Amino acid sequence: MTSFALIASVGFLLGMRHATDPDHVIAVSTIVSRQRGVGMAGVIGAIWGLGHTLTIFAVGVAIILFKVAIPARLGLSMEFSVGLMLILLGVLNLSGVIKRLASSFGHTHNLYDLEPVGIPALSANTATTHTHSVHLWNFARPLAVGVVHGLAGSAAIALLVMTTIQDPFWEIIYILIFGLGTIAGMMVITACIALPIAYTARRFSALNRGMVYASGVLSICFGLFVSYQTGFVNGLFTAHPHWTPQ
């Protein structure tokens, strides 16, 4: 029981810390930048974490049980895909394609306005129209992004576990708990990111638009950096690629 408690606590905390990696935070920031609800942002973070965990678990189990070795060029290709994903997310955000897709798949209905404390409430007969995009698109996008990000870090996590834990059963348990920590950490991060976005959306529309565009530009810039680092510095597009799982 002591060993399990130690593995669970360390794995969960490291999973939460893993959620704060710059490429992860930038990716989810771009995804939730057009969200107007903290709750939905938390759900998106959980789905991103689920996709990330699915990939890490699948690749990790293959490495642990079957001793699969990932060639340097394949490992670099997985990291390069993260850069391309960040660039794509940024372009979609800046172009407004994400917003148009969400709107086209949404549905519209009336809800009574809930006024903030200290502001006189509107009449019960007064309703405003809200568009809620609850289509599968809202969930497929963070899941796909999480899967891609999981590819880039799965080998490093599995190799780290194998050097510290010698029992394959506990290695797999650790990966699962690590994934749960990542899901929890990403839920917290996306909710925190969504707070200022939701606040400025109602009161400072110009500032809100600026935050949306800033997240898109940051995503493109960081994606270009990752792509260049992987493709040319680490040698994906050269004859002698060198890759260290991280």
Image (cartoon, rainbow, N blue to C red):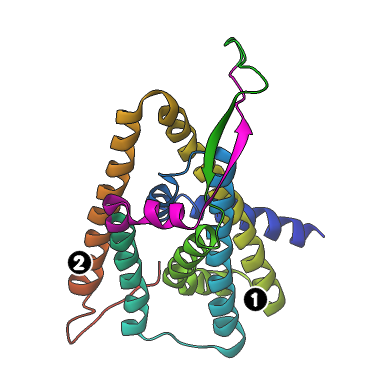
Residue tagged by mark 2?
228
Query: Looking at the picture, does residue 202 appear above or below residue 44?
Result: above
Say which quarter of the image contains residue 50. Answer: bottom right
Bin the neighbour count of mark 1 within 10 Å (Cα to Cα): few under 14, some 14-19, many 20 and up. few
Does the magenta segment cover residue 65?
no
> Can you give x and y, in whole percent of width and height, for residue 56 in the image?
54, 71
Q: From where the camera sits, is residue 4 visible? A: yes
Q: Quadrant of residue 173?
A: bottom right
**Which mark sits nearer the N-terminus, 1 or 2?**
1
Which one is nearer the viewer's eye here, 129 or 102?
129
Q: What segment carries the magenta color? A: 91-116
Name the amino acid type tagged 2.
Tyr
Q: Tell me the tag on residue 88.
A: none
Q: Please tell me which residue lies in front, 32 or 110.
A: 110
What is the quadrant of the N terminus in the image?
A: bottom right
Q: From mark 1 to mark 2, how far is it between C-alphas?
A: 36 Å
- Using the image, determine if residue 237 lies above or below residue 133: below
Residue 136 percent across, percent down from the top left:
55, 63
Residue at 57%, 70% in the rendered image? 161
- The amino acid beneath tag 1 is Gln
Question: Residue 114: x, y in percent?
Answer: 62, 24
Q: Which residue is mark 1?
A: 166
* Percent of width and height locating residue 32: 45, 47
Residue 5, by quadrant, is bottom right
